[in-house]
Image (cartoon, grey):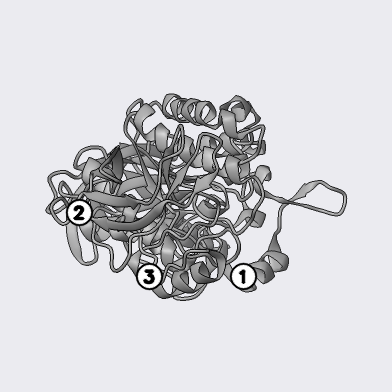
Amino acid sequence: MSRLIWCALLFSAVAPAQALRITSGAVDDQVFQRSGTGADIPLAGAAQGAAVEARVLRKFDIVMDWAPLAKVSSGTWSGSLKGVPTGGPYRIEVRVSGSGEAAAVGNILVGDLWVLAGQSNMEGVGDLVDTTPPDELVHNFDMADHWVVAEDPLHNLPGAADRVHWRRNAQGQPERLEGDALKRFVAGRKKGAGLGLPFAVEMVRRTRVPVGLLSCAHGGTSMDQWSPALKEQGGDSLYGSMLRRVRAAGGKVTGVLWYQGESDASPKAAPEFLGKFERFVQAVRDDFGQPGLPFYYVQIGRHVSNQNVAEWNVVQDMQRKAEGSIPRSGMVSAIDTALDDGIHVSTQDHKRLGRQLANLACHDLFPDRAGCAAYQRGPRPVSAVFRDGAVRVTFTSVNGGLRPLGRVAGFTIHGADGAAHPLIFKARVDPGDVNTVVLSIGGKLPEGAALRYGAGKDPCATPRTWRRRCSARCQSNSKAPCRTKNGPRKE
């Protein structure tokens, strides 16, 4: 009998510590979207006692000392930790008021959430070699709905929480990869580097504001597959999955990064691309409840292929026009990137695209930070005037002037039928105006002449760091060798 009493007393002594726990509202590694200078962090759990209190630590420093959080009712509690400042990583501790036992969640960040969406070049198919190192202030809401410290590959489609991303089995049914099969898939990956992590690390470097990434991209997908009209299908649609995950992460984000369009470069889809893209952006803003949500995207770049060349360029041109028709949007070009296969951007140029996207976000969202306001969007053509045997092409939004090394290349003149005319024998930056390129013309311009840059699917329009590789390729594929093929710098 005495032994039974002793066991009962022991259970009674430890029960409060066992009962105190955090059950929802925040998990380890989570990033909370800031509003102004901080965020309110919801917490809920179980406890034995009258009330619970909470505090916030950063390493060994007290950021917010013990303060009342919530009253306990029927063994449960819920409350909101108000005004946790932008920054981290934080440890949030909760205890029954006046007790010494505590429950905690750790590695919490307060900062900016960014959606990564689109097809394979956003998913990331770069070689997993010399990838961007992780940063303690950059976390990822992975496709299995787990918050983790971000590292490439960010996307893991076979193990995703939503069925739309799963592979199909032998019976043609979507099937999630789990257990040892998933571990083997992850361990065997050789591809998976993208622009999301380089973008986030660059934003942290410039602003010191933590970043949370929401990985939602899926290779090979079209605008129709991303249609907002499919959102009611939830996790069986790309749009529905993205919307669900945003809501699971708190419902608000700082912006969207988008890279898609390759799958729409077809005779049927290309002419409709601009309208679909505009409607998509509007639907995202409506469904997120953020009418001014920043939306930055990458113009489709190179593809080593001779199929649907005209349609590829149509999509590129519509993406160029979208920057003017969609408020609070911005585009970066990938026409001069290296590839790690026939269509996918290389790991190293994903880093450059990430920096270029950070230029846009830094300029638009952090104008008070040193250097951010100075960033321009990059060269945007504003006029092309033919006079005295030369075409003068003037650009705006140039960062520091056009500074090519060697011969300027990538410009071509086309007739009304779209055919290229070999007329440009010299191209140079005007020494008196570093925002203007002068193209010397040998011959008469055709009727309905149009000037293009980077025409085709695999043009030689490269940054200066690509001079030697592009030179060799152009000499073997062009009647006019291009010993140093260098277009205007874009960064």
Q: CA distance from mark 1 to mark 3?
A: 36 Å
- The amino acid marked with disc number 3 is Thr
Q: Earlier in the sequence, mark 2 or mark 1?
A: 1
Quarter containing the C terminus? bottom left
Q: Residue furthest front?
A: 443
| Disc 2 target residue | 430
Identify the residue under disc 1. Answer: 189
Kindly identify the amino acid type of the residue bearing the numbered disc 2: Asp
Visible in this render: residue 435? yes
Residue 467: x and y, percent?
39, 71
Residue 483 against residue 245 in the figure, above or below: below
Left or right: 368 in relation to 230:
left
Q: Residue at x 58, y 39 (%)?
A: 241
Q: Earlier in the sequence, mark 1 or mark 3?
A: 1
Q: Position of residue 385 (x, y in %)?
A: 28, 38
User: Which label sits on residue 484?
Assistant: 3
Give the percent coordinates (x, y) of residue 450: 43, 38
Residue 93 makes an appearance in the image: no
Q: Nearer the viewer, mark 1 or mark 3?
A: 3
